[in-house]
Amino acid sequence: MKMTIKALVSSVALTVAASSAFAAECIAPANPGGGWDFTCRQIGKILFDIGQVSEPVQVTNMAGGGGGLAFSHVVNERADDADLIVAASSATTTRLAQNAFGGMTADQVRFVGAIGADPGVIVVAADSPFQSLNDLVAAMQADPGSVAFAGGSAVGGFDHLKVLQVAKASGIEAVTKIKYIGVDGGADAITQTVGGFTQGMTGDMSEIVGFIKSGEVRALAVLTEERVPGFEDIPTAREQGVDVVAVNWRGLYVPKNISDDEFNAWAEKLAAVAASDEWKQAMADNGLAPFTKVGGDFQSWVDGVVAETEALSREIGVIQ
Amino acid sequence: MDILANLALGFDIALSPYTFLLAVIGCFLGTIIGALPGLGPSNGVAILIPITFTLGLDAVAALVLLTSVYYGAMYGGRISSILLNIPGDEPAMMTTLDGFPMAKNGRAGDALVISGVASFVGALLATLGLMLLAPLLARVAYLFGPAEYFALYLLAFSTLGGIASSNQAKAALASCAGLGIAMIGLDNTTGMPRFTGGNMHLMDGVDFLVAIVGLFAVSEVFVFIESHGKNSAVGIKLGKVTIPYREIWSTRWTMLRSSVVGFIAGVLPGAGASLGSFLTYMMEKSIAGNKGGFGTGVAKGVAAPEAGNNAAAGGALVPMLTLGVPGSGTTAVLLAVLMTLNITPGPTLFADRPDVVWGLIASLLIANFVLLAMNVPMVKVFVRILSVPPALLLPGVTMISFVGIYSLSGSYFDLVLMIAFGVMGYVFRKLDIPTVPVILGILLGNQMEDNLRRAMVLSDGDWTFLFSSAIANGLWIAAVLGFVAPLFLRRFLKKPELSED
């Protein structure tokens, strides 16, 4: 009895795996639940719903090394697989720039496009004395050690860099004195901030939408060029005289050795997703701002971002 | 009565024949997934996500299916713990301590029934807690900062010594080994890798499922080979299966206490079901004292961890739904599903999508009754496993463990690591060192270290920060008492008997 049940379960699992053999596969380089997983599942679902692919896209979670494991898997084992897409974001380029993928570099894959961006935000608890970004910056200028931030990435990661960028842009020299604790994701960072254990939270817009609506936190600044549609009452950092733009783009890369036609086909499919009503709805529901760059444009933009991040990380001492 | 109206709405959604069928299927699959070593609730739910999309299920139906798998897996984990001494998933680990000795004494059926009822009580109370107190309990997360979390984990570790009553030094040694293994991986406070030897597979640390399957299942194979099958845990005698009403009744307070403690452990993000089952077992053990016979196969010893971990499973849904903070690995997966369905959990979810929340609560209640109805009569089927000759059963279990571990990350590295843990488990068994503290070290060590380091960052290295709140101080007192009390009480109590393993 037990053995037949086991056989049943494993045959179900095998069928799931086998049926995906000819369908496109999207690798989310993290466990289910994060941004990359969201990218794969959402883009995969819409690709199928709008008829860009004939079979549902199979999502594979390949967690490890902050995305490095999936990156090395693609580079070393799947370099010419035209049915493979991999979720990527600012975290991917940040880690590539900081050489966190064991010597692998951004030019070992092709970045096919981004179709949305999660605007960076600086947030305080609703009862915080800081009413504007300038209040917060003034406190940091007076004593960099007096303000502690919580964020969803480890020290040196993208959330931490946002704080350091804001501090640098406001002329603070001792940026490393500013306290930062890396916790398990943006929502956790908010609970630490609302609980009063840290003075500020740095993260992405999508992570704080619910808390802004419920009035438990106050967003001091959004790190975009323009105010974000749907959240027009949150000022940008630029308006407040702090020239920092940091968005966490959501996009894909593909293996290096696929043909240009195959690369362009993915770029077109991605553009179709970006233009679909389903994606617009998903962006609105999750606090993403429009940010569409596909194909060759995106590749050159990514190269620029990697170079900038590397320079910044070196300057603030995250890498030597 | 708002709650009754809401509940009626929930049952209206969840009781359609189609969703009810999904709940039954989910419970069944979940029980099997939970019982298979290496496949726990989190990867069980993750495996089923594509199926919900392929079937085109709407938000409520998908949630019903996945949460019944979740609850089912929490029930199922105990089965292999009791019958094979191999935990089906990490929260069921504590159930091996008394469940397996019971099975060895020919009371496998009793152990399964008692733990099944305890699971039911824990899950039911937790679901009621979720229903009545969720928005209120969400505030609890705001009270726990780095200092409080550190004290909480310290409390768990301070009671570890009592886990193996024969030799506390060995338990301490084992937990140090676990803590050491937990240090492997990316250090959150500096962003630098530690002890990875440049291997990217080790960057995220050692997955505790790999450690559990290695230490319990693979080492069992080594012992089996060495003794030519004579001395193995598998192949214990079968007793007849009846429902031990009187024993269930005698554990009623244990179940109630464990449900409350487990629920609270679940509500705290990051603590989760494993901490729930551990704390409840240790609590009941110290309440019962040495006369309670914990570790030799007593009813309370299986009732406490099972009520605790099932209550924690329900509790973990509180921060997931109200804050969007996953309290455990499985709720992280459920969170992902919700977000894919364009439902954003958070403080406004209860007001924005009452259909989802109350549909979910109603389906949890239904799943719980289905599971009880399914689990108690099925005990007869489960104990039949023991009549499979060990020479067939053990390789089968091992094969499933390999498949389960491979499905975690799809890399053979984890399999090699698992075998290494198997060797470690074998050596530890030979030296009579308990393996449960190793797992706890791995499970909780990282969180404990991270929170200590965060506390030090926030306070500029001022250690008095660790005693800066009433909650932290309360936990410190409990931890010190938990550590010191056995030392002083020992001389007044009868020396515990050495267990046979």
Image (cartoon, helix red, strand yellow):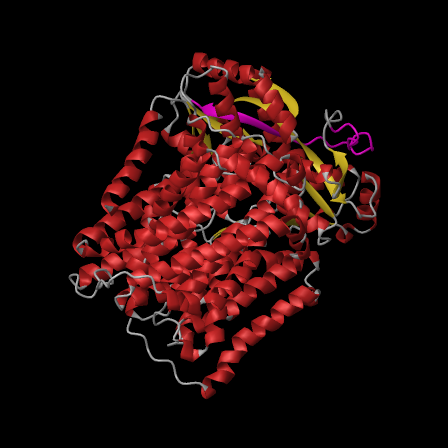
Q: Nearer the viewer, residue A148 or B362?
A: B362
Magenta segment range?
Answer: A231-256
- Residue drawn at the location 26% of the way across and 56% of the way down: B383
Q: Is residue B210 above or below residue B11?
A: below
**Residue sitting at the far left:** B228
Quadrant of res B140: bottom right
Task: Please state which of residues A206 and A252 is positioned toward the viewer in this rendering.
Answer: A206
Q: Is residue A171 visible?
A: yes
x, y (%) of residue B453? 61, 58
Q: Tell me where residue B151 appears, x and y as whole percent.
A: 60, 64
A17, A298: nearer the viewer? A17
The answer to whether residue B317 is left or right of residue B165 is: right
Q: Residue at x 47, y 16 (%)?
A: A263
Q: Position of residue B380 (x, y in %)?
A: 27, 54
Does the magenta-highlighted stretch encompass residue B482?
Answer: no
Residue at point 75%, 24% (across, down): A226
Give the image location of residue A28, x and y in percent. Answer: 47, 33
Let me know if residue A98 appears in the view.
Answer: no
